[in-house]
Image (tube, rainbow, N blue to C red):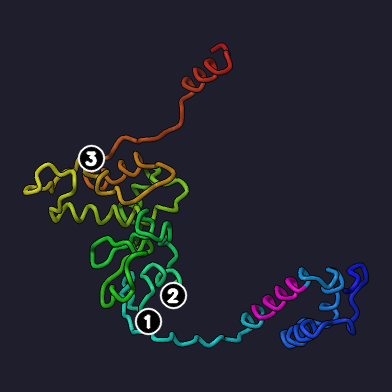
C-alpha cells in the first residue's frame, strides 16, 4: 500500500487514475493541475472526488462557450400540447411525467412548488381550464389540449392580479413556499362561488351561496392548501377583500409605543 505521506509521482498512478487523467486532459484540465490535486490529497478517494468536480466544471465551461448538447429523444414519448399562460407548448413527454414536473423541469416555470408530492399540501395547485388541480397528481398527458395557468400567469401587463395585491396588502405569505398554490386556489375559489358550487359547510346544498361567502365557507374552500407558517388569518382577509370588493380590516400590525411600554413594564419591571 502506498505511503500517504509521500506525494504521488506521475509514474505511481494506478490504471484508473491514468484513465481519469487522460479523460480530464481531453476536458481541458492541465497535467500539472491534475498532479497538484492528487498529491495534495494523498492520492486518496477525496482527490478523485475533486478531480471529478474539475471535470464537471470543464464540461460546464465547454457548454458555456457555445457547445450545445443534443437533447436525447424521450424513449416511448408521446406528443402533448399544452397552452401554458397563453403560450402553446408542443412537447414530447414520457407518458408517466406529472404536470408538476413538466412545468418545473421542461418549461422552467418553477413558481409552482413541489411540497408533499402526494396531493396533501396544495403547494402545487395550478389552474386547468378554469379549475384548480393538484399538478403533482395530474399527468401532463391529462392536460393535453387544455389551458394551464400557473402563478406566473396570474399577473398581466397591466399589473398584478387583484388576489396577488390583496396577499401583499394583508401579508398573506411568510416563507412564501405555499403562496403560488394558495393564490391559484383562491382565484379559482371565487370562480367556483360564482358558479354556485357548494362546499362541505354549505348549509343548503340546493341553494349554495353566490353572494358574499362566510368566513367558514372561505376557510373550507381553502382547506386543501396548507401553510406551515400559519398565515391563515391574513389569507382569509385577502380572499374576503377580493370577493367582496370591500376593504377588510388589517389582520396584522406592529405594536404601538404604548403597548411596547406596557410589555416592557410587565417583563422588565420598567417604569412608564
Label 2 vs 3, first from the N-terminus? 2
In this rendering, position of residue 270 left or right of residue 74: right
Label 2 vs 1, first from the N-terminus? 1
**Measured from the top left, where is residue 62 in percent x and y?**
66, 83
**Measured from the top left, where is residue 139 in percent x and y?**
33, 71
Residue designated by label 1: 91
In this rendering, position of residue 22 left or right of residue 270: right
Residue designated by label 2: 106
Residue at image position (19%, 47%) is 200
Q: Is residue 184 visible?
A: yes
- How many angstroms separate mark 2 from mark 1 (CA)? 9 Å
Q: Secondary structure at mark 1?
A: strand
- Mark 1 burial class by Cα count in 10 Å: few <14, some 14-19, many 20+: some
Q: Are marks 2 and 1 in contact (CB under 8 Å)?
A: yes
Residue designated by label 3: 216
Q: Is residue 161 magenta?
A: no
Amino acid at each position: 500500500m502506498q505511503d500517504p505521506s509521500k506525494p504521488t509521482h506521475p509514474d505511481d498512478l494506478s490504471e484508473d487514475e491514468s484513465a481519469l487523467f487522460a479523460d480530464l486532459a481531453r476536458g481541458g484540465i492541465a497535467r500539472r493541475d491534475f498532479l497538484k490535486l492528487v498529491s495534495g490529497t494523498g492520492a486518496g478517494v477525496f482527490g478523485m472526488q475533486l478531480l471529478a468536480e474539475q471535470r464537471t466544471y470543464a464540461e460546464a465551461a465547454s457548454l458555456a462557450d457555445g457547445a450545445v448538447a443534443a437533447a436525447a429523444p424521450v424513449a416511448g414519448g408521446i406528443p402533448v400540447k399544452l397552452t401554458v399562460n397563453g403560450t402553446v407548448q408542443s412537447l414530447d413527454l414520457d407518458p408517466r411525467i406529472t404536470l408538476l414536473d413538466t412545468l418545473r423541469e421542461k418549461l422552467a416555470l418553477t413558481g409552482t412548488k413541489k411540497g408533499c408530492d402526494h396531493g396533501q399540501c396544495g403547494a402545487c395547485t395550478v389552474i386547468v381550464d378554469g379549475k384548480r388541480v393538484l399538478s403533482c397528481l395530474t399527468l401532463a398527458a391529462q392536460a393535453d389540449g387544455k389551458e394551464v395557468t400557473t402563478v406566473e400567469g396570474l399577473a398581466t401587463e397591466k399589473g398584478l392580479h387583484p388576489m396577488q395585491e390583496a396577499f401583499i396588502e394583508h401579508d398573506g405569505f411568510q416563507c412564501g413556499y405555499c403562496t403560488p398554490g394558495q393564490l391559484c386556489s383562491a382565484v379559482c375559489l371565487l370562480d367556483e362561488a360564482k358558479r354556485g358550487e357548494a362546499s362541505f359547510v354549505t348549509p343548503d346544498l340546493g341553494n349554495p351561496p353566490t353572494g358574499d361567502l362566510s368566513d367558514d365557507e372561505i376557510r373550507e374552500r381553502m382547506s386543501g392548501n396548507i401553510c406551515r407558517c400559519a398565515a391563515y388569518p391574513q389569507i382569509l382577509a385577502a380572499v374576503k377583500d377580493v370577493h367582496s370588493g370591500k376593504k377588510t380590516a388589517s389582520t396584522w400590525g406592529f405594536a404601538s409605543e404604548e403597548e411596547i411600554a406596557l410589555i416592557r413594564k410587565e417583563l422588565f419591571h420598567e417604569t412608564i
